[in-house]
Amino acid sequence: MVAPASACTPMRLGDLGHLIEVVATFLGLSLFSLGGGNTLLAEYHHLSVTQYCWLTPSQFADIYALAEAAPGPSSMIVGLLGMAAAWPEGPGWALLSAYGAEIAILLPSTLLMVVACLSWNRLRDSPWRIAFERGLGPITLGILFAIGVKILQTADTNAPGVAVSVLVCLLMLRTRISPLWFMAVAGGLGAFGLINR
Amino acid sequence: MTEPSASASASPAPPPGLQQLFAGMLLVALSAFGGGLSAWSQRIIVEQRRWMSNEEFLTGLTVARLFPGPNQINMAVYVGAFFRGLPGALAALAGMLLVPFTLLMLVGLVYFRFHSLPAVDRVLAGVVAAAAGMALSMGFKIVDQYWKDPVALLLAAVTFVLMTFLHVRLVPLVLVAGPLAMAWYWPRGNRPVDGRGDIR
């Protein structure tokens, strides 16, 4: 087990300057959101747990689970990260920071998507498009495996918990059962103390 | 083409305005509570509202998956931009996110206030174990298409090792490995592919 980075001191978000820093960070990451948006999870973990200390590792795991369980695109986790960043300043700041972070992560990719939509007829047969699609695919694959391992480490549950993780992974691949059921059952196992961390 | 007469005979609806785009995406987001966002957007945009042909919709899905950004959000942006440019994209995006994001914010406020309660933490420990399994499945879900391409598997393995064991960050990794991979996979006319012959 890796010792958590306890030397990390949280930065205060009291002034507008720091909020702008949060927004700028997510603006810069937006275009690296490959493979449907999940490739950024390791980076989110680094920023919020190691670099800025917005969250402890287990809080990060909680937030990831909440974003997966809630209806809608799971990439809305960025809103929760923004909220975590400003939580010490009170709910008002937290909400402002949450909306700022979510808009920041979506704005650049949205603008690019608009351009892509309007110029797709020219892009479709471009060698750049073909090379981008074929070349970035395998890199995305490697990133997703790395993120799977990272989240598993961050979850840091006991042996029954790891067994549940592996079982859920298999069921996700072999069945079409809604993952909400897995989370509900596992939550129950947690409530009875069978899974803990 | 493969679709029977039903969709061929149905004339497409007039292009939606900003309010209709917002309302349509709001409906997609509400219908998809519990999952199946992609299927719901197809059902509503193609079958119910008839804004797009199935072919146009599938092209949009391809573009949404190719470009950076979350797939479902990109798809909403594509549909909006297809009809009304940037304002349409923003209207569709707002419709798609309004309800789910508001809900998630409420969940977040509750979480940050109560996560230290032992009962909450115990339930979450279980939920987290399941969520970790979902994260673990992401790579396996797309690995099948790469089995016949050893270079792709090598690239994926190197990426995995760099991130997991050498702790290389995402941005430098993509900026270095991306162009190299693109150069390797650059479409070359002089590679004979399926009897196409050399172009030299």
Image (cartoon, grey):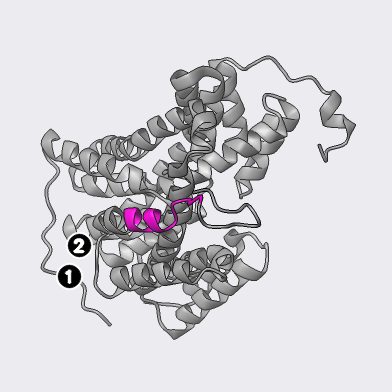
Q: Is residue A132 visible?
A: yes
Total residue callouts: 2
B102 vs B154, nearest the viewer: B154
Which residue is found at the position 49% from the left and 49% from the top? B200
Magenta stretch in the rendered image: B178-189
Measure the C-alpha gap from mark 1 to mark 2: 7 Å
B53 vs A40, nearest the viewer: B53
Residue extending farthest to the front is: B200
C-beta proximity under 8 Å, tags 1 and 2: yes
| Residue A40 falls left or right of residue A126 | left
The image shows residue A57 at horizontal and vertical percentages of 28, 66
- Where is the N terminus of chain A found, in terms of image quarters? bottom left
The image's mark for residue A5 is 1
In the rendered view, tell whether residue B79 sits above or below residue A174.
Answer: above
Q: Is residue A66 visible?
A: no
**Tag 1 subunit:** A
Q: Is residue B185 magenta?
A: yes
In the structure shown, which secondary structural element does the residue marked by tag 1 occupy? loop
